[in-house]
Image (cartoon, rainbow, N blue to C red):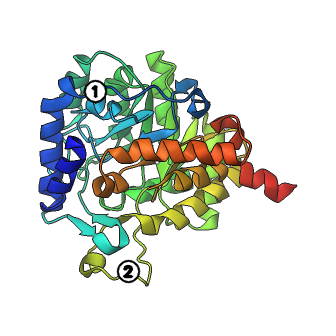
Amino acid sequence: MLIEAGARLLGGLPPETAHRATLALLRVAAPILPSAATDDPRLAIDALGLRFSNPVGLAAGFDKDAKVPDAMRKFGFGSIECGSVTPRPQAGNPRPRLFRLRSERAVINRMGFNNGGLEAMAARLAGRKRAGIVGINIGANKDSADRTNDYALCFARLASFADYIAANVSSPNTPGLRGLQNRDELTRLLDTLTGARAKSGLRIPLLLKIAPDVTPETLDNIASVVLASGIEGIIATNTTIARPPNLQSAQASESGGLSGKPLFKPSTAILRALRERVGTKLVLVGVGGVSSGADAYAKIRAGASFVQLYTALAYEGPGLVARIKRDLLECLVRDGFSSVGEAVGADLRVAKA
């Protein structure tokens, strides 16, 4: 109850101020936060060679510098994704750069990969006792002359601290970054990352985080390049530069990536289209607009092995995680599934029947 009250209080602050205050409070409170209740075994999922106690993960963007992964685990997440991190520290874009769209339960951000750099993250993670599943989302510096090399640098320095690495080529707030989704650039990037993994000797899963704003042809290319690359999965999706015509909030015209409830349908459509293209050969992660157990269940049925959220957490507070897990379990039981794994991609199987 105290945590929920604090979340409501922070919601009255400007969004970036509230986020910084949240991280500071979590760092102080982490040792005294109670651990989450043990998950129902029916919520467990095996993916990426890992055992997730539940399929509800924290998306990248909340904990960019890996300051509070263990505090967030105590709220019941099945996985935590830190980042995006870049080789060198960077301040990101000018403020204001984070905007609430309250009536739509959405956020627009143009943060621009603000983070303390890979060395600061490595130092922090080196002192952490490994527990739970923690992924690291890596990116490239805005002014880098060789962005592909930036991803290789991040992998080489941080992979030993992570349970998986996600390459973010889909932020709309670093000019030109989404060009890495094109066939030739993506092939080079994934060849570089798989080569770095082979050189490291680490058996760590690699994932690619893509945008929702892609054409069917681009999605075809992404699917074929990823399948040929040897990486393990795709995170679908990042924020969108599209603006649905029914947005009413005064901040709706701000530039940047839109997340939250309006992203649910387009991101789920991309997820389903990807599953149709890759079959069962890749692990897919569903992100975008998840704010309920029904939302998580819909993404799982569309092909996600697990889901991630962030924006809804800012509106609902950390109690949301337990509610999603409870309602997701009810959905599984209602439809006769004995585990999350049985429901993955169920909608596509029904369509083919």
262 and 181: which one is in front?
Answer: 262
Element under disc 1: loop
**What residue type is disc 2 on?**
Leu
Q: Is residue 311 left or right of residue 18?
A: right
Q: Is residue 52 left or right of residue 352?
A: left
x 41%, y 77%: residue: 243
129 in relation to 68, above or below: above
Q: CA distance from mark 1 to mark 2?
A: 39 Å
Q: Is residue 30 visible?
A: yes
x 17%, y 41%: residue: 23
Query: Callout 1 environment at 10 Å: few (<14), some (14 to 19), or many (20+)?
Result: few
Q: Is residue 1 left or right of residue 162?
A: left
Tell me residue 231's x, y (percent).
Answer: 57, 35
In the picture, which quadrant includes the C terminus?
bottom right
In the picture, which quadrant includes the N terminus?
top left
**Residue identifier under label 2:** 247
**Residue identifier under label 1:** 34
Element under disc 2: loop
Q: Is residue 303 visible?
A: no
